[in-house]
Amino acid sequence: MTKILSDALITKLTRSNKLDADDIEAIRRLPMRLHELGPKETIAADGTRPAECCLLGEGFAVRSKLTSSGERQILSLHIPGEIPDLQSLHLHVMDHDLVALTPCKLGFISHHNIRQLNRRQPNLADAFWRETLIDAAIFREWLVNLGRRPALPRLAHLFVELYRRLEAIGRAAGGEFELPFTQEQLADCLGLSTVHLNRVLQELRRKGAVKPSRQFHQLVDLEFLERLSGFDATYLHLDPNV
Amino acid sequence: MTKILSDALITKLTRSNKLDADDIEAIRRLPMRLHELGPKETIAADGTRPAECCLLGEGFAVRSKLTSSGERQILSLHIPGEIPDLQSLHLHVMDHDLVALTPCKLGFISHHNIRQLNRRQPNLADAFWRETLIDAAIFREWLVNLGRRPALPRLAHLFVELYRRLEAIGRAAGGEFELPFTQEQLADCLGLSTVHLNRVLQELRRKGAVKPSRQFHQLVDLEFLERLSGFDATYLHLDPNV
DNA sequence: CGTGGATTTGAGAGAAATCAAATCATGTGG
DNA sequence: CCACATGATTTGATTTCTCTCAAATCCACG
């Protein structure tokens, strides 16, 4: 039942970490509480103290934060195989929201069990640690994106990042990938208004960098977008040696 | 000789982690190569593969990244007791620069020794992991700052954050703290132009939120700045229980 | 003193936000 | 199968914020 979950995790972890058979076996034995959530449902709320982490097996999730004036900033996008609130293992109070974007299959794993696993298999603990560090590396690149790139390359950069990450877990190829976001959500990722995001998106379409395709799928001219945004994939640390 | 370094680390770690006597003793015994660097000198360069981490014992450092068009975004500010490149333990290639901002006393600690320490004292490993997670929590708040706050509250937020962090290690009190940044560097933290930063800073002064004081020291009206920026300190996770 | 970096000022251009309305989908119930 | 409601996208007009460029001033330091 939870095979779909552990498989997603293993796919993700083995892509950017060196794991041995023991580690993988230990993951398979990790107890998980399977749970399904629909779009906009909150997985873990700002200010709460979760006792579990949440493995995303299927679907998309986002982490976001509200300003005191009620505006939303999306902090990160999460794809299958990730544990978006792994930080709650050591940061006990949530400092942001974790929300399902699409219908999600989730596996809740108790902090206790993860801690135990980490003590028994330090190699796996290092892999989890590394995952949280890659998470942070992506935050850094997003800081550059928000701070120093104009709207057009900013959006281009986001598209390329998402493509490369999905590609790494075998969910994107040939410049095509799933993009189940409304324009409002994209705007919230990029610190832009919806109206402006819409115009920028149109400009990418006009330039042929983004082609119309079936709903919530994006077909993009990767090379063009990479050039436009100055994309350098180092920060994704997809290679265990990087 | 390296006492100043380990002391700084212990002050910082014990502020937001629960360490026992063993852990502290182990830190004191950690071999460090003492090194001093001047302003603008690079500690660890983008694209390189460091074999050591760098403990900041005295001074200020920043992490930053250049866009393809040559603009700089500062990603984080670092104060004594922090290990700004701790991520290099598991992310082998630097995806940004680490640079001294003021004259710095640094302690270089080999990855090998840290790994060994982590295996022997899992409690300490967790503390280090937690430090990198707090680092990431600050990135998240900066994303909100860059994406959703106008220039005035954005600068206000930065001032409050820096104050609160310095206060936590006993280096700020009474609304006064060390601020050894040029306006250009502040602008690079906030994704603003120098000219605009200057005008915004003047506005804070006009409002009485920032008072003129001796060079590179800032005297601020904390309550005013917190209200202006909607500051909520949760994300700093200064309390080990948070 | 003079020099170079940092800060400040002014003027003008450009990017993005806001406001308001129209259009387009999509899904529902009659 | 159509009328309608709802949410998403698009368009237009205008305002606001921030950047750029260029020059002036300030200041620390040799």
Image (cartoon, coloured by chain):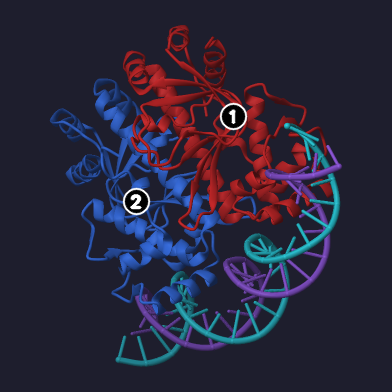
Chain colours: A blue, B red, C purple, D cyan
Secondary-structure class at tag 1: loop
Chain letter of the residue carrying label 1: B
Q: Determine if residue A61 is in view.
A: yes
User: What is the distance, in whole Å, between disc 2 and disc 1 at their CAs?
Assistant: 31 Å
Tell us which disc is closer to us: 2 or 1: 1
What residue do we see at 54% from left, 31% from top? B237
> Above or below — where is B81 with respect to A128?
above
Secondary-structure class at tag 2: helix
Q: Residues within 10 Å of mark 2 (few under 14, many from 20)?
A: some
Number of numbered discs present?
2
Estimate the x, y position of residue B24 in percent, counting from the top left.
48, 10
Q: Determine if residue A48 is in view.
A: no
What residue do we see at 39% from left, 42% from top? A135
Amino acid type assigned to the residue bearing label 2 in the image: Ala
**Dividing the picture into quarters, in which one does residue B45 lie?**
top left
Q: Residues within 10 Å of mark 1 (few under 14, many from 20)?
A: some
Estimate the x, y position of residue A37 in percent, counting from the top left.
34, 52
Residue nearest the observer in this picture, A89 or A17? A17
- Which quadrant holds the N terminus of chain B? top right
> Above or below — where is B174 with respect to B202?
above
**Dividing the picture into quarters, in which one does residue B224 lie?**
top right
Estimate the x, y position of residue A154 in percent, counting from the top left.
47, 61
> Above or below — where is A38 with respect to B29?
below
Amino acid type assigned to the residue bearing label 1 in the image: Gly
What residue do we see at 54% from left, 72% from top? A195
Estimate the x, y position of residue B179 in percent, counting from the top left.
69, 34
Disc assigned to residue A233 = 2
- Residue under disc 2 on the same chain as residue under disc 1: no
**Dividing the picture into quarters, in which one does residue B235 lie?**
top right
What residue do we see at 45% from left, 15% from top? B32
Check disc 1 and report the residue beneath it. Answer: B38
Q: Is residue B126 left or right of residue A34?
A: right
